[in-house]
């Protein structure tokens, strides 16, 4: 098994070193930091951490158009090219617990995509204001009703992909770039016949830094489910 965890960053300088320290406690895990030309020096800090990691941490410096989805797509291509057997996704802000990654990898023995879910039994949201909890739950319900996806947490960014499924996805044809990117990836995974499993996680509000949510991101998230629902529901096996 050669798992790699992708960590997209934009202005996450304070989180890089402590996050990588926790990830590297998982002996078999590689880390790829995808920095989106952060103006706060995140890229330089990532290089420093990578240099002290004995080759287990690498850094991809993006210089093209900025974007959450674009960063993940570049990271997925790089991980596949490097021979990763499993590709994990997680946020850089400690919203996702690095200690949960072995649980996702274990679950991948029976699934092609494992989602760390807030909305299955045992999942939870910690330190969130009530209005944010309600908005997140409503957003997932909205996606599920429109797209009919058989997934409880369509917007989760904590995931583990088996290489074989990622290679079947049309990564070059993705429409979305913000947090709706997670929904579109889920859709493509189901349409590709991927086996999807959800494991409960505790999602914690970020320790440091600011949220990347914006009006454009929200608008894209509202419109994308309708665009997906309009596509022919043809499974690509």
Image: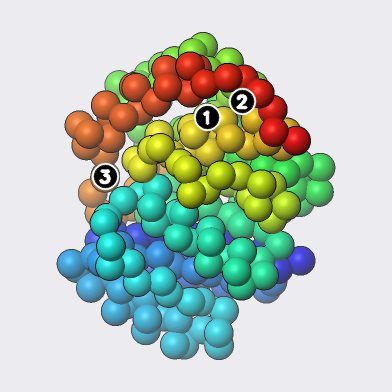
Task: Give the residue number, with chain letter if any, for mark 1.
Answer: 154
How far across and down, in percent of the image, does residue 36 sit?
30, 62
How far across and down, in percent of the image, does residue 209 sit?
25, 54
Left or right of 128 on screen, residue 11: left
Give how far apart the Cα atoms at labels 2 and 3 are. Answer: 25 Å
Q: Earlier in the sequence, mark 2 or mark 3?
A: 2
* Quadrant placement of the N terminus: bottom right
Circles 1, 3 touching at the beta carbon (< 8 Å)? no
What residue sits 52% from the left and 48% below the top? 171
* Quadrant placement of the C terminus: top right
* SS assignment at label 1: loop
| Mark number, residue 144 | none
What residue sits 37% from the left and 84% below the top? 48
Give how far apart the Cα atoms at labels 2 and 1 are. Answer: 6 Å
State whether residue 221 is above or below residue 80: above
| Mark number, residue 151 | 2
Give how far apart the Cα atoms at labels 1 and 3 are. Answer: 19 Å
Circles 2, 1 touching at the beta carbon (< 8 Å)? yes
Say if residue 152 shows up in the picture. Answer: yes
What residue sits 44% from the left and 87% below the top? 51
What residue sits 67% from the left and 70% below the top? 83
Here the colouring is: rainbow
Task: Give the residue number, with chain letter if any, for mark 3.
Answer: 211
* SS assignment at label 3: loop
How far across and down, in percent of the image, does residue 166 sit?
63, 50
Q: Residues within 10 Å of mark 1 (few under 14, many from 20)?
A: many
């Amino acid at each position: 098994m050669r798992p790699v965890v992708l960590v997209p960053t934009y202005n996450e300088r304070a989180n890089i070193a402590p996050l990588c320290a926790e990830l590297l406690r998982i002996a078999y895990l590689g880390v790829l930091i995808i920095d989106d030309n952060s103006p706060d020096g995140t890229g330089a800090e990532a290089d420093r951490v990578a240099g002290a990691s004995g080759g287990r941490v690498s850094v991809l410096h993006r210089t093209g158009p900025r974007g959450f989805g674009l960063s993940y797509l570049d990271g997925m291509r790089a991980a596949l090219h490097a021979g990763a057997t499993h590709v994990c996704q997680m946020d850089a802000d400690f919203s996702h617990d690095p200690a949960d990654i072995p649980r996702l990898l274990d679950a991948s023995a029976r699934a092609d995509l494992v989602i760390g879910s807030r909305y299955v039994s045992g999942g939870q949201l910690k330190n969130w204001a009530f209005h944010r909890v309600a908005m997140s739950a409503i957003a997932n319900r909205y996606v599920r009703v429109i797209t009919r996806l058989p997934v409880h947490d369509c917007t989760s960014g904590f995931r583990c992909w088996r290489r074989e499924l990622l290679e079947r996805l049309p990564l070059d044809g993705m429409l979305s770039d913000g947090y709706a990117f997670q929904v579109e990836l889920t859709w493509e995974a189901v349409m590709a016949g991927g086996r999807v499993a959800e494991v409960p996680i505790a999602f914690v509000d970020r320790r440091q830094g600011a949220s990347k949510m914006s009006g454009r991101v929200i608008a894209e998230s509202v419109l994308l489910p309708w665009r997906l629902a309009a596509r022919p529901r043809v499974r690509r096996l």
